[in-house]
Amino acid sequence: MLAFEDDLRGSAGPAGSDAARVGRGASVMTVSSSTLTDPTIEKQTESEEELDVPWQVVVHNDPVNLMTYVTMVFQRVFGYPREKAERHMLEVHHQGRSVLWSGVRERAELYVQQLHGYLLLATMEKMS
């Protein structure tokens, strides 16, 4: 028998024990099924009313992108016809922002992410 095995058996108990298989100085934790409990919800963070509140996708003016490029992005992301995309582009250009879409939060997040992918400045706002 090797010296290491001798030390392992002598200090950690019988050769077949969990501590002997794990190694010197290691502890083995056993959990019985009676100690586990079902998780409980302590605080509800969002009510159904908050989940139903529509969100707006807003595009803000920037001095970098060309008007034709912004129009093309609105057509690609939202599927708008050219005339509607141009109307929103001009609103952004003259008023500094335009609300392009409103609806559920997840879809609004997707649209904002897509607009950011085209390097446009876009945000989401809760409708009040």
Image (cartoon, rainbow, N blue to C red):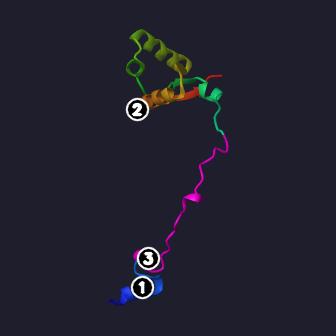
Q: Which residues are magenta?
A: 17-43
Query: Which three-letter amino acid code belongs to the residue tagged 1?
Result: Arg
Q: Residues within 10 Å of mark 1 (few under 14, many from 20)?
A: some
Front-lying residue, 56 or 119: 56
| Cβ atoms under marks 1 and 2 closer than 8 Å | no
Amino acid type at circle 3 is: Ser
Q: Is residue 97 above or below residue 22?
A: above
Q: Which residue is mark 1?
A: 9
- C-alpha span from label 1 to label 3: 9 Å
Which dot, 3 or 2, sits closer to the camera? Answer: 3
- Marker disc for residue 117: 2
Q: Position of residue 102 (x, y in %)?
A: 54, 20
Residue located beneath label 3 in the image: 17
Tag on residue 34? none
> Which of the two labelled residues, at mark 1 and mark 3, occupies the earlier sequence position?
1
Q: Is residue 122 above or below residue 86?
A: below
SS class, disc 3: loop
Residue 26 covered by magenta stretch: yes
Residue in the image at 43% along x and 14% along y: 85
Pinpoint residue 67: horizontal percent, then vertical percent: 42, 19
Q: Nearer the viewer, residue 96 or 115?
A: 115
Amino acid residing under circle 2? Gly
First in residue order: circle 1 vs circle 2: 1
Q: Residues within 10 Å of mark 3 (few under 14, many from 20)?
A: few
